[in-house]
Amino acid sequence: MTYASEYLENVEGILEQIKANQPQYRETAAAILAQVKKGGMIFPFGTGHGHLLALEMFYRAGGMVRVNPILTEELMLHKSATGSSAFERSEGKAEPLLNEYNVGDKDVVIVFSNSGINPLTIEMALGAKERGALTVALTNLNHSRPLQSRHHSGLKLYEICDFVLDNFGVLGDACVEVASGIKIGPTSTIAGAAIVHTLTAMMVEMAEADSYDLELYTSGNVPNGHERNLYLIEKYKDIIKSLGA
């Protein structure tokens, strides 16, 4: 079997596990929707490539409008990849971000971390819980369980959050071993994106059943899509930090 075929088979297997775990996702989706109905905001947050999943939920075709990603340039790989790693391994960095984004008890904080062991993601979850927010972890249990937390509490992300969603990856994320012994083919981004869009689909179904208007974006690159989105942008540009000018 080629490396590419092995990788794609592994991805297919993960997607099958996601499909099989729909009852768990439905419970999580219902809890998130309940917060949104109270007027809450969804705050996705991730470090490293988990940052991509926070952006995956934000301002995109078919995505929910009430999503306010917690972003800081210190975690952007384009600024400094090694600097971002140092930042996520430092304690005391989450509290200023939670204050800046004004996270409260009506809100949902979704933390993306494949390892779930670094201080910033752990303190983000702890701080959100202290504020009464609903917390959701999207992590890799096969990776996280055998490792030691880097936070002084000894806690890992999956031990903190109200809901824990597994991305069904392997230790180290990359899943195909090549001749050198190095592994290639990470799966956390594909799995994470599939899970968050599964949650969205479930929330839309639930909202429709309750005749609740769960606001959604349309592609800005289809007829009338941009015009439709302008109303939502105007409505939320002063509320969602990264939406306005």
Image: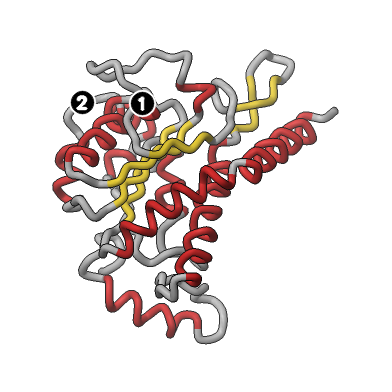
Q: Quadrant of the C terminus?
A: bottom left
What residue did someone put label 2 on? Answer: 91
Mark 1: few/some/many CA within 10 Å (<14, 14-19, 20+): some
Front position in the image: 37 or 226: 37
Tell me residue 202's x, y (percent).
52, 58
Where is residue 74? Give x, y as percent.
27, 39
Give above or below for 106 relative to 171.
below
Q: Nearer the viewer, residue 161 or 193?
A: 161
The residue tagged 1 is 159
Pick the residue in front: 69 or 84.
69
Q: Position of residue 130 (x, y in %)?
A: 18, 38
Residue located at (27% from left, 71% from top): 236
Give the residue at x 50% y 29%: 140
Quadrant containing the N terminus in the rendered view: top right
In this view, which residue lies farthest toward the front? 210
Residue at image point 56% right, 85% down: 223
